[in-house]
Image (tube, grey):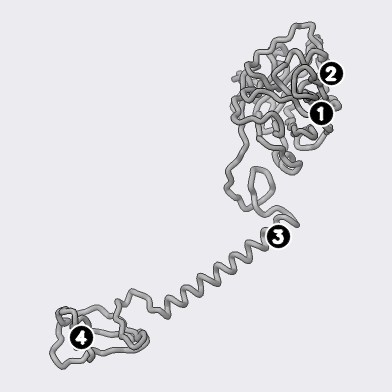
Amino acid sequence: MAEPYPGFSRGAPPPPGWSPGQALPVAQNAAAVSLPGLPTSYSSSFMGVNLFYPSWVPSYRTRGGIISMLFYGSLYAFVMFLILIVIHFTAFPIFSFSPDDNGFIPIPTVSDQQTAYIKAPAIPDLSANFLNVPACTYTVSTDLYLSGDFQASSVPRVILYRSASGNVSPPSTDTKDNLLTRFPDTNLLIWLDSIKNDLYVSIVTTSDGTAATSLLETTPAVENVPIRKVFRISVVFTQQFVEVYINGNLEKSMAVKKPPKTIADRSSFFPVISSIGPNVLISNLAFWPRALSAREVRAYGKPLTNETFYSKPAR
């Protein structure tokens, strides 16, 4: 038996203006129902049961239309995303995962890059304090400025090395033949010739992992690097090879003949040694705990600083 009005069986009071014998209008398929003293409501029939709900609640048919639109919209977005992925990896960059990688849709990522000496040139022998630096298989990059002032000396101009404490002070008579003994805590040296503006990268390798069999493997010279002009040197160091880039361009590479020497976990990167004075300055030292690809090095590219930056006090 049908209820005289909704809620009758639960003891609900009748709606205002209702009198016994008055039938409430029931409309199928979400028809409007207007009751005296009540806002417009709707009813629909579901499995033979009349359902009443306020006018601001969408009907199941309306909800079905919204779900369909969401489904097809999501499908369209997914297909477009797949197309962009294919274009990104086959034709030209679409997404930008890091600065200067030529993509135009930025994608937020967690960068593994660490930096030091970004506000002013580095103080000689001041640790970069990078974290979790492996013995090898990493990439370092720095902006470098040579004043061009001549300084008669036989001491190699070491611009980056690893050490447990820093403060390496070679005697004025030192030569490149003493690099192994002068820097016992490192397996990487980036240095300039004492007279010519030729740049080298040396790797300390060993046949049995001990210092007793240490050997210095050095790349061919990058000859006549710029003076009085900032340039960026990037070095990719792995167990198999070393690559040297200038301003994002590969200049020299070398196959590593023996395993790199194992060094202490506490060994940090240190910038230019004090003995070469202000003639060689570095800044924007960057480190990645992995070997960057050639494309990534090219994207990192050219220096961020200009010559006036190196007139700032070192810090």
- Could you tell which of marks 4 and 1 lies nearer the N-terminus? 4
Residue under the image location 29 percent in, 81 percent down: 52
Residue under the image location 81 percent in, 36 percent down: 250
- Tell me the mark number nearer the camera, choosing from 4 and 2: 4
Question: Could you tell me how far apart the alpha carbons at marks 4 and 3 are, in whole angstroms?
Answer: 62 Å
The answer to which image quadrant residue 161 occupies is top right
Q: Which residue is mark 3?
A: 86
Q: Which residue is mark 1?
A: 258
Residue under the image location 79 percent in, 32 percent down: 242
Type of amino acid at the residue the image marks with label 4:
Tyr
The numbered dot on residue 5 is 4
Question: Could you tell me how far apart the alpha carbons at marks 1 and 3 are, in whole angstroms?
Answer: 40 Å
- The 10 Å Cα crowd at callout 3, few under 14, some 14 to 19, many 20 or more, is few
Q: Can residue 79 be seen from the camera position used here?
A: yes
Type of amino acid at the residue the image marks with label 1:
Lys
Tags 3 and 2 touching, CB below 8 Å: no
For the N terminus, give its image quadrant. bottom left
- Tell me the mark number nearer the camera, choosing from 1 and 3: 1
Question: Could you tell me how far apart the alpha carbons at marks 4 and 1 are, in whole angstroms?
Answer: 92 Å
Question: Does dot 1 land on a helix, a strand or a loop?
Answer: loop
